Image (cartoon, helix red, strand yellow):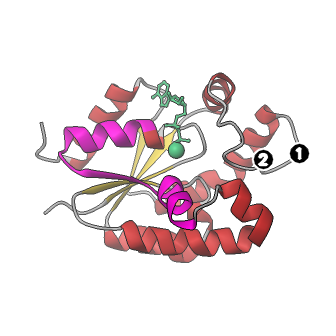
């Protein structure tokens, strides 16, 4: 039985995209904590934050993380999941944590090309490139602290999957 694999990193680093392909390659389940949380809450993340506040959203996020953690499962996490000490320790203890690391320019390019249509509230009122740069500067150390492995997420998705499989030395096709 393979341990759960947690993908961490900022918005646009490819957690959902790479996670889906990794799960297929490893014959594992795929879960996206943001999607799971929204389906179970019956409202969007923006809606939860607006109606209940960030603190409530973060509590729901931790409960989601605990609920979806299972063997042979690839878990794409929300970008801010690493902010809580509890979540970082939980992921490291329960499974293998992979940081999908990409430069600010790559992240901004992807977010501009594929806006999430308001699924997530903006974290600041600043232009996207400034927001991405500031959020990454604040969180990069936490992603690294949480991660067992750091991969280059600026490569195409299939190559990122290969980097992860190589890092894990998983026996999958
Ligand atoms: P996250 O879940 O980390 O926010 P997504 O998987 O939603 O990121 O990816 C954001 C956008 O960037 C998507 O439209 C996706 O097609 C694109 N993308 C993701 N990973 C890559 C990659 N490795 N190379 C090129 N484009 C990518
Ligand atoms: Mg995602």
Numbered label tally: 2
- Label 2 close to label 1 by CB (< 8 Å): yes
In this view, 126 is above or below 121 = above
Segment tinted magenta in the rendering:
17-41
Residue lying at the far front in this picture: please name it.
42
Q: Residues within 10 Å of mark 2 (few under 14, many from 20)?
A: few
Q: Which residue is mark 2?
A: 122
Q: Name the dominant secondary structure of the magenta segment.
A: helix
Q: Residues within 10 Å of mark 1 (few under 14, many from 20)?
A: few
Quarter of the image for the C terminus: give it.
top left
Q: Assess whether residue 159 is covered by the magenta stretch.
A: no
Residue ID at (53%, 72%) = 62
Residue lying at the far right in this picture: please name it.
125
Where's residue 28, x and y in %? 22, 50
Ligand 1 within 8 Å, label 1 CB: no
Q: Nearer the viewer, residue 47 or 112?
A: 47
Answer with the quarter of the image where residue 54 lies: bottom right
Where's residue 113, x and y in %? 64, 22
């Amino acid at each position: 039985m393979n341990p759960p694999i947690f993908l961490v990193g900022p918005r646009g680093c490819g957690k959902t995209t790479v996670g889906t392909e990794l799960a297929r390659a490893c014959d594992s389940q795929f879960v996206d904590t943001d999607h799971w949380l929204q389906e179970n809450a019956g409202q969007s993340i923006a809606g939860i934050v607006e109606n209940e506040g960030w603190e409530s959203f973060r509590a729901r996020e931790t409960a989601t993380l605990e609920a979806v953690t299972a063997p042979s499962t690839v878990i794409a996490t929300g970008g801010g999941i690493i902010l809580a000490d509890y979540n970082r320790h939980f992921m490291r203890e329960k499974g293998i944590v992979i940081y999908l690391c990409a430069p600010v320019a790559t992240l901004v390019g992807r977010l501009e090309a594929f806006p999430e249509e308001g699924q997530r509230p903006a974290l600041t009122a600043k232009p996207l490139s400034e927001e991405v740069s500031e959020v990454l500067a604040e969180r990069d150390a936490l992603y690294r602290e949480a991660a067992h492995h750091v991969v280059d997420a600026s490569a195409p998705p299939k190559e990122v999957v290969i980097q992860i499989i190589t890092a894990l030395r998983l026996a999958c096709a």
